[in-house]
Each structure stands twice: as structure tokens, then as C-alpha cells.
Image (spheres, rainbow, N blue to C red):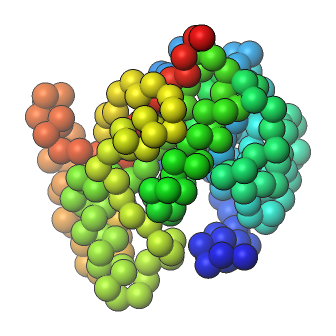
Amino acid sequence: MDKQKQVWDAIWSRDVSYEWDSLSGLIFNVIGKEAKDINGLNILEAGSGTGRISMRLAQRGANVTLVDYSLKALENSEKAFKERGVEADFLHSDIRMLNILSNSFDITWNAGVLEHFDEEEQVAIVQEMARITKPGGKVVILTPSADCLPYRVGKSYAEEYGTWPYGKEEPVTTLENVIRESGIIFKEEYNVGFLNSLDFLDFIPDTGAVKEFMISWYNKLSAEEKKRFPGYLLVSIGELSQD
């Protein structure tokens, strides 16, 4: 068992909240934007964690499959889905080698996963995501952005003082090369979630007032001005050829 898996098994062994939050909503909206119409689609989350967003996708009519290499994460998800009467498939697997038929899903996605792997492993993961995605389907990946200052500052502080809980995590500038090396079409990248990045300032003591002011200040900016400040998550879109 690798060190990173131990980190996540420990995280998912604690109490896990299934309350909807703004970050979950942000990611859900990205999937909805790329899907156009969620209802009836086959959607797989490769590295599902809580499965909170996949649950909402299922509630909106998608046929969802959750994959994670943490058995504890899947146990949490299965329990939460069952309690809410939501159907899904659950697979305990390393996402670098999935026991799933090729061309099975309309959208394959993950959020907060690839930054925990080196580039060679990232390519292997995206290749597997692409393999199980249908021709014309999409691979949607969300990773912490190296260009997002509040996230970087909060993360660096936590690492410096030993309070960073997520193990190895390398933010990315782009995944264009990873997507292209995986053999699929690179479509686009964009950033989302600047306000969510401010939550990382919570790692730094006594920054509450600064955080509140930044929220107020940012909300007053025009849409054009907001584009100057990259959000917490980089959205990278790959597409499968129709051939």
C-alpha cells in the first residue's frame, strides 16, 4: 500500500459530511456544463472520495459509477447512497488499471485526484479514463491550479508548519500535455472557484478579517476584472474522437 493511499484511508476513516457545499456545487456545475443534459448519461467518477457530487448527478438522472482505491471511501459512499435511496455502482480499484469494459461511459471525470500523482501516472490514469469513455464522450478533470495565489499561500503555510493533511499534492499549470499524451483530443482549459480558494487561508491563524474583506472585494469586481484572478480549480477537458 503506497503512502498516499494510507493518507486517504485515514481521511475517509474520520466522520465524512454529505452536506452540500459551494465547492461541490461548483464542480457539479462544471460537469453539468460539459454534459449539457445529465439525465440518462453514464458517468464515472475515477477517484470518488465522498461521492457527494456523483450522488447529486444520480439524483438528476445519471447512471453513475464510483471508483476509488480506498475501500473506506467506498463504504462511506455506499452507506450514504443507500440511506438516501440513490442507486449507483461502486468499484474498488486502482484508477490506473480499471476492470471496466472499454467505451462504457459518456463522461469520465474526477476532481482533486491527479495532483497526487506524478506525470507518468497522470498519463496512465487519463489513458484509462479515455479507454472506458465512449467515442465522442468527454474526460473532465479538475485539479488545483498553480496560478491561484490564495490556495498556494495557504497550502505553503500548512506544509511549513506541519498541518497540511492531504499528503503529496502538486498543483498544475496545465494538463494539456498529459491529455495529448493519453491519445485523446485536448479541447480546452479554464479556471473556476476563486472564492473557494480563500478557504485555504484558514490554515493561517488570524486571517478571518482578511478573508472576509477579500470576499467582499472580489464580489464587487466586474466579470471582466474577475478573470484576472485564477480560481482554485483548473478544468481540463479531453474529448474522444467519434471514429
Residue 160 % position (x, y): 31, 85
Q: Position of residue 202 (x, y in %)?
A: 35, 70
Which of the two residues, 223 or 239, is positioned nearer the viewer here? 239
The residue depicted at 72 percent of the width and 50 percent of the height is: 97
Q: Is residue 92 above or below residue 239?
A: below
Image point (51%, 32%), residue name: 183
Compared to residue 155, the image places residue 238 above or below, namely above
* Quarter of the rendering containing residue 161: bottom left
**The C terminus, quarter of image:** top right
Residue drawn at x 79%, y 65% is: 72
List x then y, in percent, for residue 70.
74, 64
Q: Answer above or below: position of 36 versus 78.
A: above
Q: Is residue 152 visible?
A: yes
Whether residue 35 is visible, yes or no, is no
In the drawing, does residue 14 fall left or right of residue 220? right
Nearest the viewer among 184 and 202 is 184
Would you say 44 lies left or right of 162 here?
Answer: right
Q: Position of residue 77 (x, y in %)?
A: 78, 52
Q: Residue at x 51, y 38 (%)?
A: 182
Q: Nearer the viewer, residue 100 or 157?
A: 100
Which quarter of the figure is the N terminus placed in? bottom right
